[in-house]
Amino acid sequence: MAETQNITLALPRDLLRQVKRLAADRETSVSALMAEALAGLANETRRYETARRRALAALKTAKSLGTGGRRTWTRGDLHER
């Protein structure tokens, strides 16, 4: 198991009451519940940053659309009525 460190966390009373109830319903501790939630947040952020870097790299190496960077149409052509 990973080394742990205690922290102090201040929560509004109503939120703490809800979290304690949720932890009891799941038969776990508030600490374990918070660790799980924070790990999920960190993982979500890491996955987002990885996807962002991949998308930006894809933009830099995008394939040519065959226009040579020139627009060959007008707004009117695209929105003919």
Image: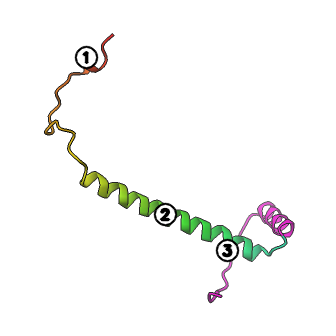
Please name the residue shown 62% across and 87% down the image: 2
Across the whole image, how many numbered discs are drawn on residues?
3
Numbered circle sitting on residue 35: 3
Disc 2 target residue:
47
Q: Is residue 7 above or below residue 51?
A: below
Horizontal relation, residue 56 to residue 34: left or right? left
Most distant residue in the top direction: 81
Q: Amino acid at mark 3?
A: Ala
Mark 3: which secondary structure?
Answer: helix
Q: What residue is pinned by disc 1? A: 76
Mark 2 or mark 1, earlier in chain: 2
Q: How is the image coloured?
A: rainbow
Q: Position of residue 6 (x, y in %)?
A: 67, 85
Is 15 one of the magenta-colored residues? yes
> Spatial distance from mark 2 to mark 1, Cα to Cα?
41 Å
First in sequence: mark 3 vs mark 2: 3
Amino acid under label 1?
A: Gly
Report the disc number at residue 57: none
46 vs 3, left or right, is: left
Circles 3 and 2 in contact, beta carbons < 8 Å:
no
Q: Find residue 18 and report its image quarter.
A: bottom right
In the image, which residues are magenta? 1-26
Front in this rendered view, residue 8 or 50:
50
Q: Residues within 10 Å of mark 1 (few under 14, many from 20)?
A: few
User: What whole-number distance in Å separates the C-alpha atoms at marks 3 and 2?
Assistant: 18 Å
Name the image quarter holding the C terminus: top left
Q: Along the horizontal axis of the image, is 47 left or right of 13?
A: left
Assess whether mark 1 and mark 3 are in contact (beta carbons under 8 angstroms): no
